[in-house]
Image: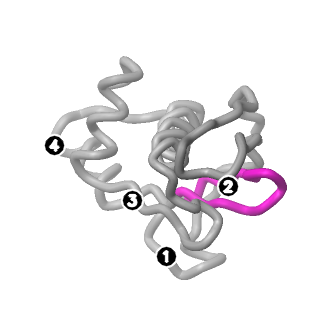
Amino acid sequence: MSYIVTPFEVSSKGLEAPVKVHFVHLYSAIATRHSDSIDAVFLVDGLKATVAISCATLAELRERDRKNLTDQQLADIAALHLRRTLEHGYEATEAELFLRGEELRALGRELGYL
């Protein structure tokens, strides 16, 4: 599958210089990291950054709220989360960024997906 996330650049007072961000892929982390998440992988100035989207939150959205997010929508939500994290000066390539619960819902609502 191919998802379109337009490459973007982020500037922040917390970053030494603007960084360029490119989406790489979206995949289930159960097999690769034994994690109950969907991983969105990006390159931030060539270094890997992973946004781990909670499968439990996705299941809750599906079962309780009757909302199903597409892979494209998940990639968009992960990109927005990464952008905001970088804007706050956090070094996103040092550890996985976890996206769960209300934070995922808020980003989905902001993008018009929920």
> Of the numbered discs in the image, which one, if any, rests on residue 55?
3
Which label's residue is closer to the chain start, 4 or 2?
Answer: 2
Q: Callout 4, which amino acid?
A: Arg
Q: Is residue 42 above or below residue 33?
A: above
> Of the numbered discs in the image, which one, if any, rests on residue 64?
4
Residue at coordinates 25% horizontally, 52% vertically from top-left? 101
Which SS does the magenta portion mostly show? strand
Tell me the element at label 3: helix
Q: Callout 3, which amino acid?
A: Cys
* 3D distance between C-alphas at marks 1 and 3: 9 Å
Q: Residues within 10 Å of mark 4 (few under 14, many from 20)?
A: few
Q: Nearer the viewer, mark 1 or mark 4?
A: 1
Q: Residue furthest bottom?
A: 34
Q: Which residue is mark 2?
A: 41
Which label's residue is closer to the chain start, 1 or 4?
Answer: 1
Write the start and end of the magenta stretch as one range: 39-51
Q: Callout 2, which amino acid?
A: Val
Q: Which residue is mark 1?
A: 35
Q: Nearer the viewer, mark 4 or mark 2?
A: 2
Q: Nearer the viewer, mark 3 or mark 2?
A: 2
